[in-house]
Image (cartoon, rainbow, N blue to C red):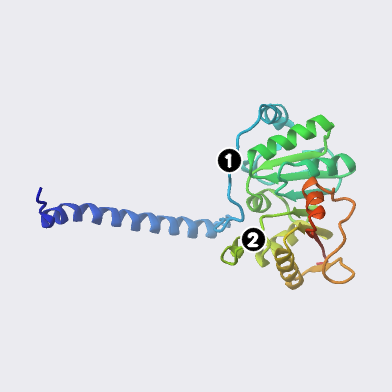
Amino acid sequence: MLVNLALVRDNTQPFLNTLFCQANNMSESSNNNLEQAKQEGKYIRTIRSFVKREGRLTKGQAAAIEKCWPTMGLEHKNGLLDLSEVFGNDNDVVLEIGFGMGKSLVEMAKNAPHLNFIGIEVHRPGVGACLMDADEAGVTNLRVFEHDAVEVLADCISDESLSTLQLFFPDPWHKKRHHKRRIVQTEFAEKLRSKLKIGGVFHMATDWENYAEHMLEVMQAAPGYKNQSETNDYVPRPDLRPLTKFEQRGQRLGHGVWDLMFERTK
């Protein structure tokens, strides 16, 4: 069958022109929305440090969310928190970014009833597992967000309200072209500093040596922080951070783990 290419071209060109115009309009609209949000002082996330992979909830995790969320769940949409109201006391608050399945976070909360803990995690199965463990352990000094941590910090956490910020084993984004996705960056360190009380500590841990070096470089250059390491690099794992099964396995295989603790000084 012979096809008149000129006719096909003439018929499709208006359609392609329409698509091109629509794409341009969408791009202009997105740029206008971004600019308007910036003018209004709203935080807009452009590069994410995580890829959200939705796993299936177990029955236990789903039941824990249904049971515990009314008392332990926090919603980003509700905005700025009054931490004294959230916990019913004025105890110091420890916030952990990306708690995974939450086992170490629950253990810390159980071992330190004189402190309040907030955990932030984007993966729903991890949230469910954390709530399930917290419920079984009888922990009452723990609250959780299921949301992007950077947005929670920007919109829900008051300045100078936290005694400790924890970031344990974040995604190392080991390929060089992905390093921009690493959560520990200069801007991030500055935003965290504003949330810490004077004397508050930003505690990081990673099992990826190159990321540890990156963390150290960023934090050494960040204003208003002091390295708590006596050797001005890394600190031994403090007792307050539980040794996970993942770490124990890594140690048996000869893998290293690096802890960094930086104190807010101004």
Are the residues tagged 1 and 2 within 8 Å (C-beta)? no
Which amino acid lies under the numbered mark 2 shown in the image of this protein? Arg
Estimate the x, y position of residue 215 in percent, counting from the top left.
73, 65
The foreground one among 3 and 15 is: 3
- Residue to which mark 1 is pinned: 54
Residue at the front extreme, as displayed: 253
Q: Position of residue 95 (x, y in %)?
A: 77, 49
Q: Is residue 186 left or right of residue 47?
A: right
* Quarter of image, res 227: bottom right
Seen in the picture, residue 206 relative to 80 is either above or below; the reply is below
Q: Which mark is residue 191?
A: none
The residue identified by callout 2 is: 182
Of the image marks 1 and 2, the number of the one nearer the N terminus: 1
Picture coordinates of residue 33 (x, y %)?
A: 46, 55
Which residue appears at 88% of the width and 50% of the height? Answer: 240
Q: Residue at x 52, y 56 (%)?
A: 37
Residue 167 in sight here:
yes
Query: Regarding mark 1 in the picture, which secondary structure is present there?
Result: loop
Query: Marks 1 and 2, Cα distance to the nearest angstrom?
Result: 21 Å
Q: Badge 1 local density, few (<14 within 10 Å), some, or many (20+)? A: few
| Residue 84 in the image: above or below residue 132 | below
Residue in the foreground of this view, choosing between 225 and 77? 225
Relative horizontal placement of residue 125, taking residue 42 as reference (left or right):
right
Three-letter amino acid code at the position of disc 1: Glu
In the foreground, 264 or 5: 5
